[in-house]
């Protein structure tokens, strides 16, 4: 039962075990499960949940104190860069305490002090239901998988501080993707081939149930290589101990690929035509085109570069964290389920290629057709190719990775959400970065041009009391307060309807509107902006606007834009604040709909069922604790808007703890 595999007919598969003496000794008998251990794990899980429930520490505000007591001690400020000199993308937020980051001279004596953050403000920023390590720095999700009833998340982690560096693999397990138990580090830099970092990798689960983990190591000489690791004890559902293969590194940069341009192997997929497992690695070529190369292996011992490139897009630079997976595109019940990485290509199947652009630090995807025989992938629409078209998220969301969840037959997306505050503030608060709420990913059979991303359904278990504000009409230029007692952790679902007459009247206004240049919530047009103000204080001196804006496109058609305005999210100045967003497809007869997850310093929004998503990190100074409010707003000049439905749930915290037996 615990070795349950989605497909009872195993893939054609031949596997030669690693050579004897290799640390990676796979089990020979794999249908047997240590059920006793598993049920012990189940018992301790429920005890853990009970303990968490009974604990008086129900308020996330009672979390540990930030390290520092004073934010105004004399410190010297210089813009920092972390990552690029080591061979990965920029990890520093770029938020400079003084906002005078133009002065890179290092002479900080004249720089004004950073915003005087207090402990109360900093403590409030820690989230209640997002995944975060107990402290310190995290970035990319690694090797997510489901095994023997448990979801595993590994992640890039600095055990030493709240800034990027000394990267290891953190590890946590969950039964529901929402409540997590923290486990000891899974892998640390302890071999020459990963001495400068145990970097990002992906898991492949073979039809036998065996797990192979391919990951990038930065060697003692800062060369990027691919390494193999396997669980030391496959009968341990916690997968606590990992052994690195004696044959590491299994891959060094091939000819023509720079030593620092070869990272982040994907999950492998099985190709029955040549009986090998294939996986992709992102890179760039000599003319700054992003490229994807593919390897094949019959056994994860011998590897061969597949000739040609899976894909190449000029001008897009280094591709990090490539992800490649099939989606069901035919209308019907299959389209509501995820597909396993090795699922056969066919008429009802397309492949999503996603890459993280080192140049602009956004995750782009495109939907296309994969041909294993020619080792090529072609986008459906060349104008919407990877790196120039669709993004998973128009706010902050990077280095993401999906996995197939056989227990619920779905594909789940994890993404790293960085900080928009200064490193100085991160060090004060003792942590930096978190993971987005895991999202299910499906092909949108209605538009047929994008994916749908939606918070995994388990998130709804955290919903507590709700209030129904359906039917409120807000006139042009007005704001309407919503009476929510604790507005720091919310799940909001809203559907809007705009006056028909106003829509009809709108002949040629706002041609070529664009979220980033449209003036945010203060940029008024005939049919927008309207939506919600979250993490707002009573007098609205702080608020984050989540809104729609309808404008006419250059082609004459009405187009709906979906945006976040962070410009007034905080009084503090040492924060990156932007207006972000994009267009969202709205089909005939559809209402405008949005779901918003608010969790202290993060706001994640999903428009039209997840066609367009935006994530913001915001750091209010006044709109915190009991002072946090929510409003409806309509800053359109000539249309009233009705919230046909509007439900707001207060969300419970997950109270994640270290795993204990
Ligand atoms: C890395 O670890 C060393 C040794 O513990 C420590 O001195 C250093 O500050 C750490 N670097 C970062 C960026 O955390
Ligand atoms: C890196 O490790 C390799 C393998 O142990 C060794 O041959 C090489 O000398 C090391 N390089 C440095 C700079 O220490
Ligand atoms: C909220 O109220 C509206 C109208 O009263 C009703 O149609 C809707 O079902 C309610 N929604 C929820 C989630 O209770
Ligand atoms: C807000 O809601 C609470 C109950 O949730 C209620 O007691 C209070 O009267 C409401 N306030 C207003 C102004 O409607
Ligand atoms: C919006 O404007 C910005 C800045 O001019 C530009 O970089 C971006 O491409 C535009 N976005 C769209 C969707 O047109
Ligand atoms: C609406 O627009 C006006 C004028 O630009 C601006 O002053 C006001 O702050 C906006 N309202 C909101 C809620 O952003």
Image (spheres, rainbow, N blue to C red):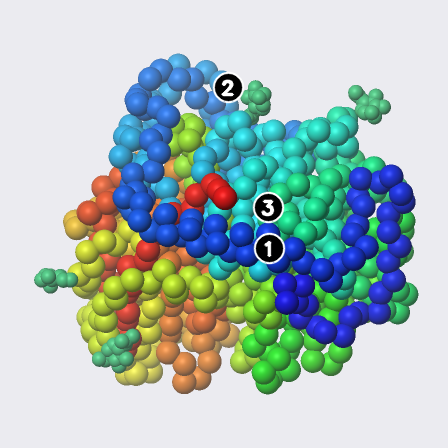
Cα separation, mark 2 vs mark 1, equals 62 Å
Q: What residue would you read off at disc 3?
A: 154
In the shown orientation, is residue 467 left or right of residue 201?
Answer: left
In the rendering, at what x and y percent does residue 274 appear? 90, 65
Q: What residue would you read off at disc 2?
A: 105
Q: Which numbered disc, 2 or 1, marks the residue closer to the eye?
A: 1
Cα separation, mark 1 vs mark 3, equals 25 Å
Q: Is residue 656 above or below residue 528?
A: above
Q: Secondary structure at mark 1?
A: helix
In the rendering, at what x and y percent does residue 625 appear? 23, 45
Q: What residue would you read off at disc 1?
A: 36
Whether residue 188 is visible here, answered yes or no, is yes
Q: Earlier in the sequence, mark 3 or mark 2?
A: 2
In the rendering, at what x and y percent does residue 293 appear? 80, 53
Q: Which numbered disc, 1 or 3, marks the residue closer to the eye?
A: 1
At a point 76% along the width and 64% down the height, the residue shown is: 207
- Say which quadrant the N terminus sits in: bottom right
Tag count in the figure?
3
Between 639 and 496, which is closer to the camera in this rendering?
496
Between 229 and 239, which is closer to the camera in this rendering?
239
């Amino acid at each position: 039962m615990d070795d349950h595999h989605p497909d009872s007919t195993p893939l054609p598969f031949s596997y030669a075990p690693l050579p004897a003496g290799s640390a990676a000794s796979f089990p020979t008998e794999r249908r047997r499960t240590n059920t006793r251990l598993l049920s012990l794990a189940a018992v301790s899980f429920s005890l853990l949940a009970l303990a968490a429930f009974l604990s008086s520490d129900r308020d996330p505000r009672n979390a540990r104190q930030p390290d520092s007591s004073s934010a105004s001690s004399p410190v010297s400020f210089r813009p920092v860069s972390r990552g690029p000199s080591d061979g990965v993308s920029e990890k520093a937020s770029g938020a400079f305490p003084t906002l005078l980051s133009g002065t890179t001279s290092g002479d900080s004596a004249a720089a004004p002090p950073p915003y005087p953050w207090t402990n109360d403000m900093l403590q409030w920023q820690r989230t209640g239901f997002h995944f975060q390590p107990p402290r310190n720095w995290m970035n990319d999700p690694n090797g997510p998988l489901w095994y023997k009833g448990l979801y595993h998340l590994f992640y890039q982690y600095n055990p030493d501080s709240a800034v990027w560096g000394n990267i290891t693999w953190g590890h946590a397990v969950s039964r529901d993707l929402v409540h997590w138990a923290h486990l000891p580090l899974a892998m640390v830099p302890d071999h020459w081939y990963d001495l400068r970092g145990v970097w990002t990798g992906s898991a492949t689960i073979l039809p036998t149930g065996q797990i192979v983990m391919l990951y990038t190591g930065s060697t003692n000489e800062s060369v990027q290589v691919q390494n193999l690791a396997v669980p030391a004890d496959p009968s341990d559902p916690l997968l606590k101990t990992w052994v690195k293969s004696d044959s590491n590194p299994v891959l060094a940069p091939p000819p023509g690929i720079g030593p620092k341009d070869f990272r982040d192997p994907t999950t492998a997929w099985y190709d029955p035509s040549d009986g090998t497992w294939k996986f992709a690695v992102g890179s760039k070529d000599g003319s700054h085109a992003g490229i994807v190369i593919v390897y094949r292996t019959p056994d994860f011992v011998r590897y061969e570069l597949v000739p040609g490139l899976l894909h190449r897009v000029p001008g897009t630079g280094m591709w990090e964290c490539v992800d490649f997976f099939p989606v069901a595109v035919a209308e019907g019940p299959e389209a509501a389920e995820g597909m396993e990485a090795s699922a056969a290509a066919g008429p009802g199947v397309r492949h999503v290629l996603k890459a993280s652009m080192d140049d602009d630090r956004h995750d782009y995807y495109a939907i296309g057709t994969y041909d294993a025989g020619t080792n090529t992938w072609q986008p459906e629409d060349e104008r919407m190719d990877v790196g120039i078209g669709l993004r998973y998220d128009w706010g902050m969301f990077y280095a993401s990775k999906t996995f197939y969840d056989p227990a619920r037959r779905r594909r789940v997306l994890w993404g790293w959400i960085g900080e928009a505050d200064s490193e100085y503030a991160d060090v004060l608060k003792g942590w930096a970065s978190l993971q987005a709420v895991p999202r299910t990913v499906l092909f949108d059979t209605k538009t047929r041009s994008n994916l749908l991303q939606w918070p995994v359904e388990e998130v709804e278990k955290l919903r507590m009391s709700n209030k129904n504000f359906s039917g409120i009409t807000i006139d042009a230029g007005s704001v309407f307060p919503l009476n929510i007692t604790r507005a720091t952790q919310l799940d909001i679902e809203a559907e809007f309807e705009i006056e028909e007459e106003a829509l009809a009247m709108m002949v040629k206004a706002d041609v070529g509107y664009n979220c980033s240049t449209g003036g945010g919530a203060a940029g008024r047009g005939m049919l927008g902006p309207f939506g919600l103000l979250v993490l707002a204080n009573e007098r609205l001196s702080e608020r984050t606007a989540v809104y729609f804006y309808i404008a006419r496109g250059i082609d004459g058609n009405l187009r709906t834009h979906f945006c976040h305005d962070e410009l007034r999210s905080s009084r503090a100045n040492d924060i990156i604040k932007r207006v972000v967003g994009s267009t969202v497809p709205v089909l005939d007869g559809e209402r405008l709909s949005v779901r918003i997850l608010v969790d202290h310093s993060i706001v994640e929004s999903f428009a039209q069922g997840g066609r367009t998503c935006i994530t913001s990190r915001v750091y209010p100074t006044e709109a915190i604790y009991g002072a946090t409010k929510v409003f409806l707003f309509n800053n359109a000049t000539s249309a009233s808007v009705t919230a046909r439905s509007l439900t707001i749930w207060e969300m419970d915290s997950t109270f994640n703890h270290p795993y204990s037996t």
